[in-house]
Image (tube, rainbow, N blue to C red):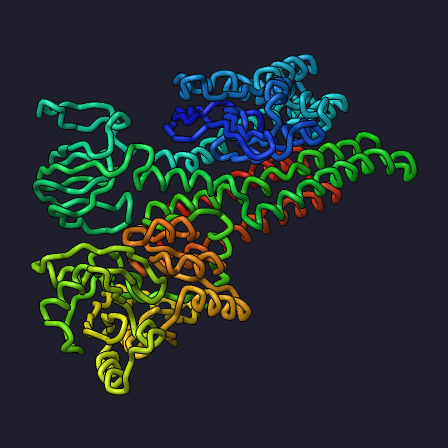
Amino acid sequence: MNMSIKDNKTKSCGCSHSPEDASININLSTTQLEGEVQRTEIRIMQMDCPTEEGLIRKKFQHFKGIQKLEFNLIQRVLTVEHQPEVLPHILQGIRELGFEPELANTEGTLAPQTEHKQSLTPLIIAAVLAAIAEATHWFDGSTWIVLAASLLAIAFSGLSTYKKGWIAIKNGNLNINALMSIAVTGAMLIGSWSEAAMVMVLFSLAEMIEAKSLGRARNAIGELVNLMPTEVLMQQENGEWQRIDAKQVPIGAQVRVQPGEQIGLDGVITQGHSTINQAPITGESLPIEKNIGDDVFAGTINQTGAFEYQVTASADNTALARIIHAVEQAQGEKAPTQRFVDRFAQIYTPIVFACALAIAIIPPLFLAGSWFEWIYKALVLLVIACPCALVISTPVTVVSGLAAAAKKGILIKGGVYLETGHQLKTVALDKTGTITYGQPQVTDFVLLSNHQTENEIRTILASLSAQSDHPVSQAITAAHSQTVKIDVDHFNALLGRGTQAEIQNQKYWLGNHRLIHELERCSSELEQQIEQFEKQGKTVVLLSDETHALALVAVADTIKDSSKEAIAALHQLGIQTVMLSGDNPHTAQVIAQQVGIDSAQGGLLPEDKLEVIHNLAQQGQVAMVGDGINDAPALARADIGFAMGAMGSDTAIETADVALMDDDLRKLPSFIRLSKATHAILVQNISLALGIKLLFMGLTLANIGTMWMAVFADVGVSLLVVANGLRLLKMKF
């Protein structure tokens, strides 16, 4: 069951919550896996920080029937792999933690929810009362006024913290709510009423500010969703035009778009022409001219002319929908740094809690220390102990990077690729459709046999080439558009070589130099002819029957203007470049020299490209960039695979880890620069979070630290690392 969710920001159960609304699509579903195991996605509006994740993990770590838990905190989705019969118990367990689980209903939809913004009034009242308590204490006023004002301030600002803290303690989890509840209660017990009140108010205020900051990361994907129009103008069977829900439009329908409108679905223009702003999909800064036969994408903006187009993808399968879905999935995959931080936090918090307990007990019992002094220090350490700032810094940074890349037309399928991209040492690139436009044109035709007339050979050539979607075959077909085609039987694609088929009960081959060699049809004279064309940077294709090579066709491709810039930018980043092509070695070398690529290898089959990538990987992290089915094995083997998103085959795009949506290689160095920035911010955030906590721990043990400082050390650092991570949304790369 798939569904669209209205992701309204509710008050969360931990370190972050947001009252604002944002529309974000998430597919909530229950799918059947092998062995009667189900994979169920559950939305939990109160779950958006490691505080809640820790509670849920603790609750279900020994739960029979659960095989795996996956958390997407940014989108508030818990995915559970479980036995079918335990789902009701899972939902009940979530409710026992004070959360409300949401599943798709029988129709696969979720009723829209309207949630109100969190009121500031209780927090304002609490702040005033805490200030009164602090001022009264400062001027040695009535103890009863201090006591009453402090209790009321804690009641107005901290009851939810106490409730969540009790749930955490009951479930054996030392999260920030539990630590804050213990610390504030301890402060009241030792008579620090005004300070306890002010600490609780500051904690609640900081949480609210942090929630608004986290909302920006969540909204980054929501902004992509808002690009999708809900209605389109579709032609009815009677010829009339009517606006209907985009989700109800079938593939093949005719849709009309007026100037200034957003395009609602993917399609191909059938009538009219216009200029279209494709920035939401490809990140291109300039509008693109579109004419009959050109593709258009949902979410892009029609600027100048009205046109009609035929729908080629349903609403949930448009390029924009796939981008959103891929980014949402990527958010749920933890990057290496995030996995390390999570493991570290599981050890860090109990150790600090044990240290705080020891500080509260050992000095007064064995070193004649003051109970008040050492208990107070222990309470300060408890507040500092929460690793929330450390843990939340990584997902916010990674999600901001993923969203920023998507807006630039770079679709990254996981945080692991974004984080590790800065380690790349070598980038290997396919030639056709990657470095070149992949739209070659026939430049030469040479008749090699007099066994048949030129017209007969051209007819066979055109008929064979029309069966293949390879760019070279398409060029031959285009050059023979006026030639009458004849029936082709038993057509077979020879991967990395060409094609083979039967025409009028006669076998024919149309392929590259390698294929003609394998068929033993290549004479020394023909070798010289082929070499002459290849030295000119042209690709040679030959037609052969069962005994002779019949014709030679030379085609030439055009290098993309952006390719030279991209290669130069990669070299500036210290990246070695290699071109891997199925084309002949001469042509590969010529193209590589023109573009500035360090080295080139030609005549490669898919398995050869795979072997080259494997060897390059022994020297360091390697990326592969390609667009065809024959690139898929190398894309899968590379540490990071890049696919051309516009011209690339579905297989290449599905296999790759990153898709460049407008086939512009300049986005490749942009990705690496973004990866470097992401890595730098992750290091900054971890260093900041740990450094400030260690600093305040030292200040506390030196009798300088206070509970106020502890709150700033915890929640204040959370605000800093979140703000630092969000810088990626505005960063130019």
Relative placement, left or right, of 138 versus 242 is: right
Q: Quadrant of residue 547?
A: bottom left
Where is residue 399 shown, x and y percent of the image? 46, 43
- Image quarter where the N terminus lies is top left
Confirm whether residue 113 shows in the render: no
Where is residue 30 shown, x and y percent of the image? 50, 27
**Relative to the observer, which residue lies in front, 568 or 612?**
612
Confirm whether residue 274 shows in the render: yes
Tell me which residue sits at (20%, 43%) in the image: 296
- Image quarter where the C terminus lies is bottom left
**Relative to the observer, which residue lies in front, 163 or 186?**
163
Establish if 659 lies above or below 152. Answer: below
Where is residue 634 shown, x and y percent of the image? 44, 61
Tell me which residue sits at (16%, 40%) in the image: 302
Q: Quadrant of residue 242?
A: top left
Tell me which residue sits at (75%, 43%) in the image: 701
Number of labelled discs?
0
Q: Which residue is most to the right?
A: 366
Tell me which residue sits at (12%, 41%) in the image: 270
Relative placement, left or right, of 434 versus 203 is: left
Establish if 266 lies above or below 107. Answer: below
**Relative to the observer, which residue lies in front, 75 or 235?**
235
Where is residue 516 shown, x and y percent of the image? 30, 74
Q: Which residue is most to the front?
A: 505
Q: Quadrant of residue 449?
A: bottom left
